[in-house]
Image (cartoon, rainbow, N blue to C red):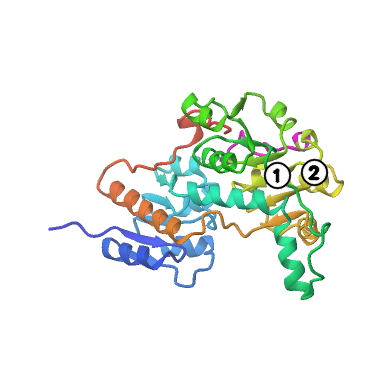
Amino acid sequence: MASPKPNILVTRRLPETIEARMATLFETHVNEGDVTLTGDDIVEGLDGKDVLVCSITDRIDAELIARLPKSVRLIAQFGNGVDNIDIEAAWAAGLTVTNTPSVLTEDTADMAMMLMLALPRRLVEGTQMLVRDGVWAGWSPTSMLGHRLRGKALGIVGMGRIGTAVAQRAKAFGLNIHYFSRNRRPPGVEDPLEATYWHDLDAMIEAVDIISLHTPHTRETFHILSADRLKRMRPGSFVVNVSRPELVDEAAMLHEIECGHLSGAALDVFENRNGIDARLLALAEANKVVLTAHMASATLEARIEMGETVIVNIRAFMDGHQPPHRVLPESRHGRPSPA
């Protein structure tokens, strides 16, 4: 007799094609309301289930992990980041955790490049001037003057898949590529980009016009762009972040923009656990900051690939194999690279 299908709880709505595929392979229970579930909701919903399919909006901390039904054996994250999951607690409880890396590279790099263009070319400001005011005085030689990117120095923090994809795009726009990473990239990566490697992040920060962050959030990278490093940045430079809000000391960054040291920031991620900082919103209103709603991976193609990766992880695990995208605690695979 064939074994019963794995029983899974999916905490958020996924693309229709993914939900339909999951329904054919698993006993699938989806949060139809598509709102963030409470810890109690998750624990109750997992009664008798084998797998939790969660996302970045679900807080899977040690306290919740301790309450999970004994039937649960796998936490399959729909997403690359696992900041919301206590990996150490899951490991101690004998749970396997997986994520969906690699599928977001191109879309995230596109978003970083768009933000890199939007701020110096005053794209949002120019749009709002027309839409909000409804009146345009017409073209003039001094109207809406921004700054060109060609010839500027871009400093990439984290030259992994996404950082390299950003560098490739930026090179095409004529930027000079600099990067900081724990390990230097091979000549096959560096040479086509004419990229300059820096082993000292502080030194690189002082030498570039734009800092773009592409490193995961770990103990080592928390506030990697610290108050001190923000002060070290060139006057008039700016920050691009499509990675994790925890990488930047947000309060310090806001101060450096408010006092005029930095020209601004372009952010797809920012601290919003207790609502968006009023100072950040004020700077956005003043067109010193461009904000987007965590959209870097928001393409249908990416979300479908993420769903397919979740399915592969679940099937491999339930078939008794090591899932291809298992996430281990830092102590189990050494200290992660800061970039």
Query: Gap between marks 1 and 2, in whole Å?
Result: 8 Å
Q: Residue furthest bottom?
A: 134
Within 10 angstroms of label 2, few (less than 14), some, or many (20 or more) residues?
Answer: many
Residue labelled with disc 1: 239
At 73% from the left edge and 44% from the top edge, which residue is drawn? 238
336 and 173: which is toward the camera: 173
Q: Residue furthest right?
A: 259
At 61% from the left edge and 52% from the top edge, which residue is drawn? 114
Percent across and percent down for residue 139 are: 79, 64
Residue labelled with disc 2: 262
> Looking at the picture, which amino acid does disc 1 mark?
Val
63 and 174: which is toward the camera: 174
Within 10 angstroms of label 1, few (less than 14), some, or many (20 or more) residues?
Answer: many
Any magenta on residue 43? no
The residue stretch that appears in magenta:
216-229
Return the disc, 1 or 2, that comes first in the chain's sequence.
Answer: 1
Q: Is mark 1 on a helix, strand or loop?
A: strand
Percent across and percent down for residue 78 are: 45, 54
